[in-house]
Amino acid sequence: FSSFGPNASRKLKPNVVASGTTVAARPFGRFGEVDGTSFASPLVAGFAACVMQLRPGLKAMEYFDLIQRSAHLYPYFDYAHGFGIPQADYFFYTKKEPLKTFSVEIKPSEFQSDDQNVNTPPQGPRKPQSSRSISIHLADEHISKSEFSAFDYFYYHFGNDKDELLHYEVVIPVSSFDIPVPDAGAKVFRAFYKGYFFELILNKL
């Protein structure tokens, strides 16, 4: 329900998010669903108070960083969700290594990545390409089978060399789909799906 980022100095906004919808008391002992950013803010403030009780003695920006790191999309971010919804279990359980929920195929080969799971094309001379795209393939066991497939959103963005976002989207994925690279200013591609985060550095053409 809030405005999208970035802020005036091109920094990330929002940093985290919380529900803007709640059930509130109404006259005569009744209850009803109501909306507003004034519900999200106290949820995060209460979460911050709990973190301060759990980890006393830290500096303000250390709490700020902890809350960001606890969010469900971290380290992925965008200008609509920030790093996502803070998660209390971050402070009580060791985070397990996420399962690989999708793979990436490069079309064509103007990219580099440290991820060994990327299917890189064979080396050799290539003709100049007029367009570029990134092909996403969901692992069979992670293709959405939910009746309400919006529970399984696929998040992705492209950033420039200042790590400002040029383009970001949230999509309901199918088993395989292509994502076009927006322009030559795109220097990094990041994606998040069902807990798995992927980052790809794009070479200069």
Image: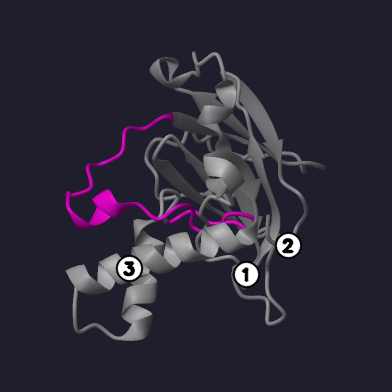
Pick out the residue farthest to the right: 130
- Residue range in magenta is 75-101
Quadrant for the N terminus in the image: bottom right
Element assignment for label 1: loop
Element assignment for label 3: helix
Above-or-below relation of 101 to 53? above
Above-or-below relation of 201 to 30? below
Which one is in front, 88 or 28?
28
Q: Which mark is residue 66?
A: 3
At x 82% / y 42%, what residue is drawn?
Answer: 130
Amino acid type at circle 2 is Gly
Amino acid type at circle 3 is Leu
- Label 2 sits on residue: 185
| 7 displayed left or right of 23 | right
Which one is in front, 126 or 150?
150
Is the magenta region chiefly helix, strand or loop?
A: loop
Amino acid type at circle 1 is Asp
